[in-house]
Image: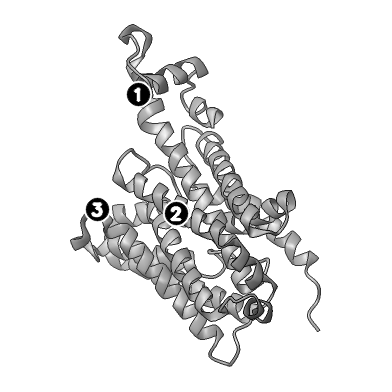
């Protein structure tokens, strides 16, 4: 975290960073010890990005872990199942056409949540249309719905007729933490992610049962259909809030849960909080690379996560046992 605050187009030494943080959290620091430019860079620009990046990374990671347990497939994540695309479509409709403006400052997260929830319901309806819902059907349905909703988002961008709005939405769709700032929107993201992580951790035993199979879940007193519906709402809410704040960032929910399981095993009571921690660290470093690789130009953070996630997905695909 310190490196993410210190490094950037303008380097701020660690001692100055400590003084700035101390002046805001613990008490006043003599004015001659603080450079106003450093204060603006550290407190107003970089620290909100670190907090938002931590929350977004943690949220994507725990949602990916929940989805992998829900569909019993190691390739499941919010991006591949089309949930990110649904949230993006809802948010783009709000940004470009003002859908839901009556909700005030909550219009963007509300629109993204509705989009994510609709996408999730569509995936389950398509996957279950031919009979029993299976993990393969869910993945195929998620990819199909994701492509369709991406096309919807692209149509909204071109139909808006606003060049500036189109540029901002296209950059935002690849993921960015540039909108991070202190205030209630950031507090909402943090609160939702913390609540989601807490709920999934407390229900870790039920996630374990669901990951083993529906029959085992029934034996252990878990109603699979009802629990999946609850997970669907929880994941959609978290993804909607996260996408509204930082755009559509892929592969975090795919890569990080596997790393967490390697560290602490598959018991979700331990794996969920570890996944949240690793997701936060992963996205903070991804944002640092996005800000510094081509400085002063900033790379969309989704490009950085894709560089890591795509090879990881290829590796997982090669390890999967063939289906006969």
Q: Which of the two discs, 3 and 2, labels the residue nearer the N terminus?
A: 3
Quarter in which the C terminus is drawn = bottom right
Q: Which residue occupies the extreme bottom position in the image?
A: 130
Question: Residue, x 68% and y 77% (percent of image)?
Answer: 216
Left-right relation of 144 to 321: left
In this view, the mark in front (3 or 2)? 2
Q: Which residue is mark 3?
A: 105
Left-right relation of 323 to 164: right
Residue 213, image quadrant: bottom right
Using a 10 Å C-alpha cutoff, classify the residue at mark 1 as few (fewer than 14 neighbours), some (14 to 19) or many (20 or more): few
In the rendered image, residue 211, in percent from the top left (x then y), is placed at: 66, 70
Using a 10 Å C-alpha cutoff, classify the residue at mark 2 as few (fewer than 14 neighbours), some (14 to 19) or many (20 or more): some
In the rendered image, residue 254, in percent from the top left (x then y), is placed at: 62, 59
Q: Which residue is mark 2?
A: 195
The coloring applied to the image is one colour
Q: Is residue 92 visible?
A: no
Is disc 2 placed on a helix, strand or loop? Answer: helix
Using a 10 Å C-alpha cutoff, classify the residue at mark 3 as few (fewer than 14 neighbours), some (14 to 19) or many (20 or more): few
Q: Which of the two discs, 1 and 2, labels the residue nearer the N terminus?
A: 1
Question: Residue, x 59% and y 71% (percent of image)?
Answer: 70
Nearer the observer, 241 or 277:
277
In this view, the mark in front (3 or 1)? 1
Q: Which residue is mark 1?
A: 24
Mark 3 → mark 2, Cα distance in angstroms: 21 Å
Q: Is residue 239 visible?
A: yes
Task: Identify whether 80 is placed above or below 272.
Answer: below
Task: Identify whether 77 is placed above or below 297.
Answer: below
């Amino acid at each position: 975290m310190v490196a993410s605050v210190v490094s950037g187009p303008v380097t701020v030494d660690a001692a100055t960073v400590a003084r700035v943080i101390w002046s805001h959290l613990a008490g006043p620091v003599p004015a001659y010890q603080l450079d106003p430019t450093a204060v603006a860079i550290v407190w107003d620009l970089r620290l909100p990005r670190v907090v938002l990046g931590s929350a977004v990374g943690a949220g994507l990671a725990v949602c990916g872990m929940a989805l992998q347990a829900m569909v019993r497939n190691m390739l499941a994540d919010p991006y591949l199942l089309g949930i990110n695309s649904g949230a993006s479509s809802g948010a783009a409709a709000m940004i470009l056409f003002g859908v839901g403006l009556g909700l005030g400052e909550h219009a963007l997260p509300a629109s993204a949540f509705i989009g994510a929830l609709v996408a999730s319901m569509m995936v389950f309806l398509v996957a279950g249309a031919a009979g029993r819902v299976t993990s393969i059907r869910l993945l195929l349905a998620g990819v199909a719905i994701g492509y369709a909703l991406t096309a919807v988002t692209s149509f909204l961008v071109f139909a808006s007729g606003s060049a500036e709005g189109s540029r901002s939405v296209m950059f935002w769709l690849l993921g960015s933490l540039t909108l991070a700032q202190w205030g209630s929107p950031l507090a909402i993201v943090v609160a939702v992610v913390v609540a989601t992580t807490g709920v999934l951790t407390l229900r870790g035993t039920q996630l374990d049962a669901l990951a083993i199979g529906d029959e085992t879940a029934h034996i252990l007193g878990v109603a699979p259909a009802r629990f999946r519906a609850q997970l669907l709402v929880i994941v959609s809410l978290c993804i909607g809030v996260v996408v509204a704040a930082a755009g559509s960032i892929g592969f975090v929910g795919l890569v990080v849960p596997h790393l967490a399981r390697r560290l602490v095993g598959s018991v979700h009571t331990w794996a969920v909080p570890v996944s949240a921690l690793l997701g936060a660290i992963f996205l903070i470093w991804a944002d640092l690379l996005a800000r510094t690789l081509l400085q002063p130009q900033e790379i969309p953070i989704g490009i950085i996560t894709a560089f890591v996630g795509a090879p990881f997905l290829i590796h997982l695909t090669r390890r999967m046992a063939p289906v006969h």
